[in-house]
């Protein structure tokens, strides 16, 4: 598990600065939700933490170690995207075990890891199916299973539920919450869904145009929004 420190992190594409000196300290086991309008830099911040995007300036520190220059595979973080990121030609078991096979884990260790994850996620009966033979919710569970088996120090979630219908989103939200209670792994979760943010977050980070507007518990943001932007976004009366 991980304590994640984002220190004065900036990001520019060409000469356009899209993240402006972001500072954020995340405690071990905390569930942080990043909210903000489309284009404000949420995915870019997550991708920099994952190592998929270079940091223009500043430091990303995990458990006291600066990781700016580490390759993604050396970071021990797992990213969860929308469910369509599964490999269509592989079974559920194949999708879940892929990263472990790449890292040449022993067969019995792989079997134990995917067995445990499939029990946690209710996938045991579906292990030989291919993604096209699964419902949207089942696919999303496989995407989560693929992340869990790696036993990452932290989960990075980029709008994982955004292409599911409302009923399924609610159900998956509850599953993610249950999973977090069970594993207690540090999570950074991006969404533009206000209800997701309010129900999942220990703390919400409200972003706009590459800057953090407010960091606080859901109640803090609702009861004491720092400005009109946060009030409008969270839907509080201020
Ligand atoms: P969000 O996830 O909050 O919707 P993003 O982090 O995806 O926002 O994007 C933030 C801004 O950076 C947007 O204006 C987007 O167009 C721009 N951007 C993202 N990736 C690139 C890239 N590879 N090259 C140029 N601009 C990019
Ligand atoms: Mg995004």
Image (tube, rainbow, N blue to C red):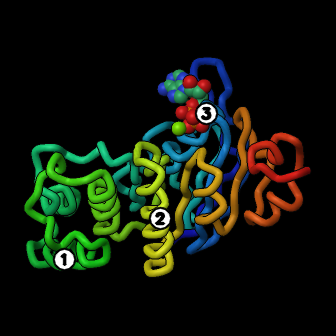
Task: Residue 117 in the image: state x and y as whole percent.
Answer: 27, 73
Camera-near label (1 vs 2) is 1
Tell me whether circle 1 and circle 2 mark residues in contact (CB < 8 Å).
no
- Is residue 64 depicted above or below 109 in this figure? above
Tell me whether circle 3 and circle 1 mark residues in contact (CB < 8 Å).
no
Q: Earlier in the sequence, mark 3 or mark 1?
A: 3
Q: Is mark 3 on a helix, strand or loop?
A: loop
Q: Please give the residue where the numbered disc 2 appears in the rendered image.
A: 154
Real-space Cα separation, disc 2 to disc 3, in angstroms: 24 Å
The verdict on label 2 being within 8 Å of ligand 2 is no
Task: Residue 43 in the image: state x and y as whole percent.
Answer: 53, 40
Residue 153 visible: no
How many numbered marks are there? 3
User: Residue at 30% across / 43% down in the picture?
Assistant: 84
Camera-near label (2 vs 3) is 3
User: Residue at 81% across / 59% down in the picture?
Assistant: 222
User: Residue at 86% across / 61% down in the picture?
Assistant: 223
Q: Please give the residue where the numbered disc 1 appears in the rendered image.
A: 115
Residue 133 visible: yes
User: Residue at 69% across / 51% down in the picture?
Assistant: 7
Q: Please give the residue where the numbered disc 3 appears in the rendered image.
A: 38
* Mark 1 neighbour density, 10 Å: few (under 14) some (14–19) many (20 or more): some
């Amino acid at each position: 598990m991980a304590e994640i420190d984002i220190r004065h992190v900036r990001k520019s594409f060409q000469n356009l600065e899209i993240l402006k000196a972001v500072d954020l300290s995340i405690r071990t086991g905390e569930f942080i939700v990043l909210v903000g309008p489309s284009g404000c830099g949420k995915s870019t911040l997550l991708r920099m933490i994952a190592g998929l995007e270079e940091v223009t300036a500043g430091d990303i520190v995990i458990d006291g170690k600066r990781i700016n220059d580490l390759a993604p595979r050396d970071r021990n973080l797992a990213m969860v995207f929308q469910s369509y990121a599964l490999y269509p030609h592989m079974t559920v078991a194949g999708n879940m075990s892929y990263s472990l096979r790449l890292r040449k884990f022993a067969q019995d260790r792989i079997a134990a890891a995917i067995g445990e994850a499939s029990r946690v996620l209710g996938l045991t009966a579906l292990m030989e199916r291919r993604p096209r033979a699964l419902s949207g919710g089942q696919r999303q569970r496989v995407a989560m299973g693929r992340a869990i088996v790696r036993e990452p120090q932290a989960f990075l979630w980029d709008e994982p539920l955004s292409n599911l219908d409302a009923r399924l989103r609610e159900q998956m939200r509850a599953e993610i919450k249950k999973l977090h209670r069970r594993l207690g792994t540090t999570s950074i979760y991006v969404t533009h869904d206000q209800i997701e943010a309010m129900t999942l977050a220990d703390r919400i980070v409200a972003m706009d145009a590459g800057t953090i507007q407010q960091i606080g518990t859901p109640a803090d943001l609702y009861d004491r929004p720092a400005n009109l932007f946060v009030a409008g976004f969270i839907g509080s009366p201020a």
